[in-house]
Image: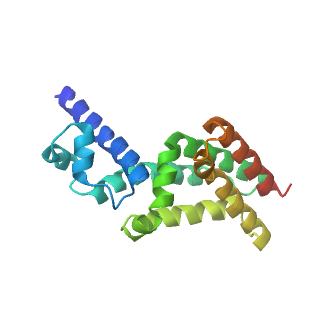
Amino acid sequence: MAGVDNRRTDTRERILAVGLRLFASQGYANTSLRQIADELGVTKAALYFHFKTKEDIVTGILTGYLDGLNALIEGAEPQTAEGREQLLRRFAEHQAHWGLNLMRLIRENFTEIGNLPFGSEIKKAFRRLLDTLAGPGTTVLEQTRARTAFVAIQSVALAAEDKSADERELREAALTVALEVLHGR
């Protein structure tokens, strides 16, 4: 029985990975369940066994991302500058773990994702992250620094498209800029 469960989990993970890649490259609205099934080499019926709709697939992708984001926020210590810096560093690692396709998915399909029931959860998590990065009792300047540092980390997805540097270099540069902004340097 364990072999069957492992195959189901593996198939589910493969569906999420292919869905992420296709949603990021073609757009959520332009990707069909048929295309995902074809890419996987399975029937639509096999795909339906795991996910009934595209919304279910994108929700599956974003649930994993959101769980990690919420864990970062819960473990943060925003009372100190060092705690906020650690949160920013862990957020940069989280973004790197999920890769450029997730950032493209969110950026290129922001309206569609925002309109999904799950979209409000992503928006809330980003708001909590920004509030935590800014720290307690913050000024407008500190809030602006937190937002700008957040955007700097996410800018890797845009910069990677011009192929002027490799992804690792871009991530390091983005983190350096984000930390400078967060600390007001």
Of all residues, the one furthest to the left in this rendering is 45
Task: Tell me if residue 118 comes above or below residue 105 in the rendering.
Answer: below
Give the image location of residue 5, x and y in percent: 22, 33
- 101 displayed left or right of 33: right
- Quadrant position of residue 144: bottom right
- Quadrant position of residue 134: bottom right
Give the image location of residue 93, x and y in percent: 60, 42
Q: Nearer the viewer, residue 13 or 162?
A: 162
> Could you tell me which residue is drawn at 37 percent across and 48 percent down?
22
Q: Which image quarter holds the N terminus?
A: top left
The reply to whether residue 108 is visible in this rendering is: yes
The reply to whether residue 139 is visible in this rendering is: no
Q: Nearer the viewer, residue 15 or 140?
A: 15
| Color style of the picture | rainbow
> Could you tell me which residue is drawn at 36 percent across and 67 percent down?
116
> Could you tell me which residue is drawn at 61 percent across and 46 percent down?
162
Q: Which image quarter holds the C terminus?
A: bottom right
Task: Tell me if residue 132 comes above or below residue 140 in the rendering.
Answer: above
- 124 displayed left or right of 132: left
Of all residues, the one furthest to the top in this rendering is 3
Q: Nearer the viewer, residue 19 or 61?
A: 19
Q: Nearer the viewer, residue 167 or 5?
A: 167
- 182 displayed left or right of 88: right
Give the image location of residue 24, x and y in percent: 43, 51
**Total marks drawn?**
0
> Could you tell me which residue is drawn at 61 percent across and 38 percent down?
167
Of all residues, the one furthest to the right in this rendering is 185
